[in-house]
Amino acid sequence: MSLVLHFSDSHLYADKLGELKGICPYDSFRAVLSHAYAKFPKPDVIILGGDMAQDESAPTYRMVVELLREYDWQVPVMISPGNHANLSILNASLIPYLKVLFSYSEHLQLPSWQVITVSTHERGSVGGCLSDRELSRLNTLLSASGDLPTLIALHHHPIPVGSRWMDAIGLSNRQELWKIIHAFPQVKALLCGHIHQHFDAVYEGVRVLGSPSTCVQFTPGEDDFAMDNISPGYRWLKLEEDGAIRTGIERVEGFIPPDLSNTDPY
């Protein structure tokens, strides 16, 4: 069995006191990490979902590394970039530190599984798109992996989740992704963020999992933007040797936006 931890949509600022919708992303992310370390001190891999840095700045990306280093996690760290990202800054200020301090990878082979992360970042867009390069890379990795059970992590949701406003900013070229997945039955699950809520469905035989934000949560099933009265959290996954997946959501107390009626974009 291999244990995966997924932290997504942290929306951090370089200013540790910065607030988003009335809560402090730094404090909520730190609380989530503390909870995860207490409950799962020895994961096999950590996946950082997209939208880590609300301000997309180098100091904020380095802050992510500093926070991870507070815990004795000697494990590989993977990233699935999303819309709130500056890839040039991320590549220069985050990934080099992860390579030195952790074992950074975009493709990780575990004893009985493989994990692949892909970028759905599309410059200037809130929605996501898999570039031709990413689609080709994914196809190549899957072609070379035989029947090894596979988890693919991406930021934008690859199927509708039932919220009109959110589904309008999902993965725009999901048909191209599913065309590849249909050719490789070893793909057991897709893991996404972006939706700021728990999601668990099976689509065309493949499990699709969405994780909560370590910051503000969105209300499921709403036509328009709405924040949920629920605490931040993260997802854990236990990848079994027989290809099965056990998974769940953990949450920390507090960090509820004081004004849930605030529908201003951020």
Image: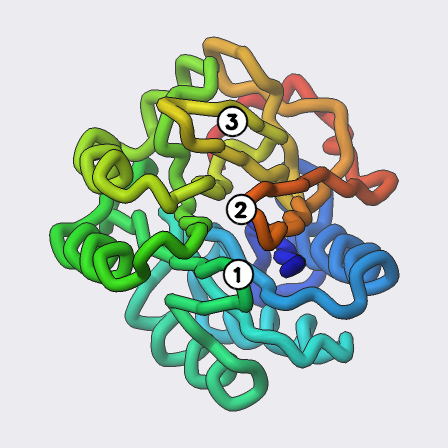
Residue sitting at x 54%, y 59%? 47
Callout 3–callout 1 Cβ contact below 8 Å: no
| Quadrant assignment for the N terminus | bottom right
Query: Any mark on residue 243, and which?
Result: 2
Among numbered discs 3 and 2, the one appearing first in the sequence: 2
Look at discs 3 and 1 and give the one toward the viewer: 1
Look at discs 3 and 2 and give the one toward the viewer: 2
Label 2 SS: loop
Residue corresponding to mark 1: 112
Callout 1–callout 2 Cβ contact below 8 Å: yes
Locate residue 148, reporting x and y percent: 41, 56
Residue corresponding to mark 3: 264
Residue sitting at x 65%, y 17%? 261
Residue 7: in sight, yes or no? no
Callout 3–callout 2 Cβ contact below 8 Å: no
- Of 260 and 33, which appears nearest the observer? 33
Is 241 rendered above or below residue 223?
Answer: below
